[in-house]
Image (spheres, rainbow, N blue to C red):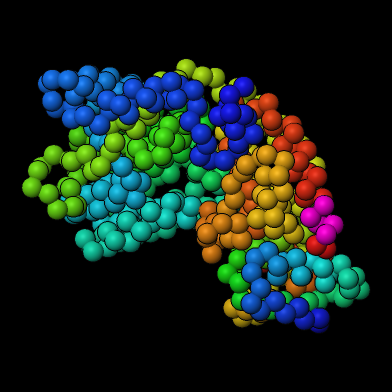
Amino acid sequence: MREITCLGMKCPLPIIELSKAMKKYPSENAFLLKSDDVATLPDLRAWSRMTGNAVQAIDAESFEIRRGTSGQSL
Amino acid sequence: MSPVTADLAKNFQDLAPFSPPIRENLETFFSQGDSDPRSIFGPGAENSIRLEASLQTFSRVLALPPESIHFIADRALAFTLSILGHAKTNEFTTIRYSAVDKKDAIAAIIEAEQFGVARSQSNVDLTGSIRFGSDPDLDLGKTLTLFQIRNGETGIWQTSLPTGPLILDATSLNPRAWGTTLARELLGTSSFWQSAIFDATSWGGPRGLYILALNERASWRNPLPTLDPRLPKYGASIPLTLMSAVKLEDEVARDSSRIDKANALLRQELRNIEEIDLAGESTGDRLSISLLNVPADELMRRLAIDHFLVDSGSACSASELAPSHVLSAMGLLTHGNIRIRLRDENLDSVRPLISSIATHVHSLRNELL
């Protein structure tokens, strides 16, 4: 699982960093996003709905993303 | 084209320079407007007549009994007076509200707990419909519902009334259309409404004039310290009151179809942009869109270079550190958000605005991803 560390970054950078990583590593299916920005959680929910990728909260600052596995939600 | 009209032509912000009906009367209202209307000599007498006429306008257009109308200078104060005033009577055990209500209103509801009134928050779905639900533990006869008939950020209006006594948040209501029929039905025929709050900016009036309407049959006590049983004016400015009435008269005579068509055009064209969230389905003179992987502040800056001014609910775009609670509650993307307010004066600029948004979104995404 590839880790994307965005601690200290403000909206919309964590989502942009996630999108960049998914584009850069097309064969990678799972990512771990670390972010402490308050907008990340609601934006990941919307991002999951819009892109069809699944997101699961590990804790308040860690989110597991699985490519193309829609149906799961935070 | 005058400079002010030029500003309005590309201004899609919520607050914009005053439109012609206000500007034409501005000098009169301010030169005579703050004299005491209780004075029977001089400009005060004229103001007394004007204020009475404005009261009749508000009453007729907003379907409110004249005696129910009170002018307030501040929105938070209007919500506080309404919500705490009902809570203070001990008639209600619970106040229901929704996750997309204004923060001013939610703050007042939290404050109402000091009067022993519990609070119950209802959720909102992706379309913006408030799900008041039917909690079996709630005694609906003793539950006061804060009912936001139209959301100011998204323009989404509700289409059915909740059961039981309610406070009508009509602060985003425009008399042309967009939820007005339901509001007039409620205010004109139902005894369920306890109070209602209006904001003059929703019909293009000036900021700083709010109407708190109190139903004469409602249970309400002034929650603020006062020795006068009547509700004081609480700082409402006479010139702003008169300007608001003039704009309301102007607005109610106007048609909504051109704005509805412009909204539909925006939706149709903007849907061609990939990964975009559009709030609601038909939202009248307001539109909220969120664009994935686009920083709202930079998009706004680039639109401003093209002379287009818009608002945003994104955390990165202004003084707010938290994202819009409205977008978040609906499950919409909170970043890359811009809000567009349509007026008769800016409709001819809608196509160029669409083109400008599409161009800048494309270039920003290319630069960032």
Where does residue B285 sit, x and y in percent of width and height?
57, 33
Q: As rendered, which of B141 and B283 lies closer to the eye? A: B283
Residue B196 in sight: no
* Number of marks present in the image shown: 0
Where does residue B300 sit, x and y in percent of width and height?
66, 49
Q: Relative to residue B215, is residue B189 depicted above or below?
A: above
The quadrant of the picture occupied by the N terminus of chain B is top right
Q: Residue at x 41, y 35 (%)?
A: B206
Q: As rendered, which of B343 and B11 lies closer to the eye? A: B11
Q: Residue at x 69, y 32 (%)?
A: B350
Residue B206 in sight: yes
The quadrant of the picture occupied by the C terminus of chain B is bottom right
User: Quadrant of the rendered structure where residue B314 is?
Assistant: bottom right
User: On the rendered structure, is B207 left or right of B51?
Assistant: right
Magenta stretch: residue B366 in it?
yes
User: On the rendered structure, is B253 left or right of B327?
Assistant: left
User: Quadrant of the rendered structure where residue B219 is?
Assistant: top left
Q: Residue at x 34, y 38 (%)?
A: B210
Where does residue B174 sit, x and y in percent of width and height?
47, 31
User: Quadrant of the rendered structure where residue B316 is?
Assistant: bottom right
Q: Relative to residue B27, is residue A29 depicted above or below?
A: below
Q: As rendered, which of A57 and B254 lies closer to the eye? A: B254
Magenta stretch: residue B140 in it?
no
Q: Residue at x 34, y 50 (%)?
A: B76
Where does residue A63 sit, x and y in percent of width and height?
68, 76
- Bounds of the magenta span? B363-367
Q: Relative to residue B261, is residue B164 depicted above or below?
A: below
Q: Main secondary structure of the magenta part?
A: helix
